[in-house]
Amino acid sequence: MVTYAIGDVQGCAITLQRLLERLAREAGFDPARDTLWLTGDLVNRGPRSLDVLRWARAQSEAGPLRERLVVVLGNHDLHLLALAAGAAQPGRKDTLGAVLAAPDLAALVEWLRRRPLLHAAEVNGRPHALVHAGLPPDWSVARAAALAAELHEALAGPRWRSAVAEVKRQRVERWDDAARGGPRLAAIAATLTRLRTVGRGGRLELDFKGPPAQAPAGSVPWYAAPSPAWGQHVIVCGHWAALGLHLQDDVVACDTGCVWGGTLTAVRLAARATDRLTWQERNAEGLRTEG
């Protein structure tokens, strides 16, 4: 069994299918045997979010990838849940109208809100953790998993609409261990789905979207601090399109900006960085989204 990770799809259904076909043809990917990890942000900005959601739900419930397709929630997935709950208004660049008008919206939302925020598993003898954005350097995987489980429980439960409303309502600048209720859920969501750089005093620079070289003064990429608390784990993530494909011994960051006219990237996970292989498929949706 081989595990592949694919970066942010964001409604690029055609590109995703072409990449999966390449994996089958060139890497021997077998959906009846191998495992596929998706880094979150299945939806928004691209033109076919509904197709991506329907494919992922069908695969995980009854398709060849059943029990071997792992999807973690990203910030755009949480935004869709907030829209479906009536807790947010569509943004100017949103492309979620077809999802919100779909006859199977309720079933898709039920499936999506039960996805985890973090998935940890051993791959080829080394522990890995899948999360959308990354981890603060002082969070171990065990701590991150416990916090992710708090938000997952809220989203999967009967009061999920209130939970996504709190996530959208609260402005988060840094993690606070003492936070409770809505502010705590919002801080968990912000950290796991929007993190790119960490500033002085643990400040989360959530509005920054540029490349690492343009990071705000005093801040560093989340993965760059020495001796991070996640230890021997490999953190697998997406979210940071301006970072691009970034592979180091303990990080696999694979959002390569497909929806912005870039590529969709798959990485074959391995115990050693030197053993990883990548495949990239250029945006095939017939458009280039800007901004």
Image (spheres, rainbow, N blue to C red):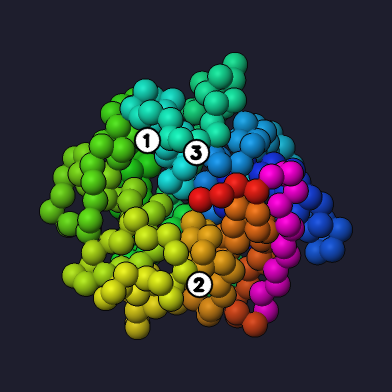
Percent position of residue 175, x then y = 22, 58
Residue 270, image x and y in percent?
A: 63, 73
Q: Secondary structure at mark 1?
A: helix
Marking on residue 93:
3
Please state which amino acid type lies under the numbered disc 2. Answer: Val
Q: Nearer the viewer, mark 1 or mark 2?
A: 2
Dot 1 and dot 2 residues touching (CB under 8 Å):
no
Q: Residue at point 51% right, 64% down?
A: 242
Q: Secondary structure at mark 2?
A: strand
- 158 vs 189, nearest the viewer: 189
Residue 239 sits inside the magenta stretch: no
User: Does residue 226 appear left or right of residue 274 in this picture?
Assistant: left
For marks 1 and 2, the one nearer the N-term is 1
Q: Residues within 10 Å of mark 1 (few under 14, many from 20)?
A: many
Q: Nearer the viewer, mark 2 or mark 3?
A: 3
Decide which of 171, 149 is in the foreground and name it. Answer: 171
- Residue at x-position 49% and y-position 28%: 110
Q: Is residue 199 visible?
A: yes
Residue under label 2 = 251
Compared to 69, does 125 lie above or below? below
Which residue is identified by label 1? Answer: 155
Tell me where the magenta segment starts and ends, as one range.
275-287
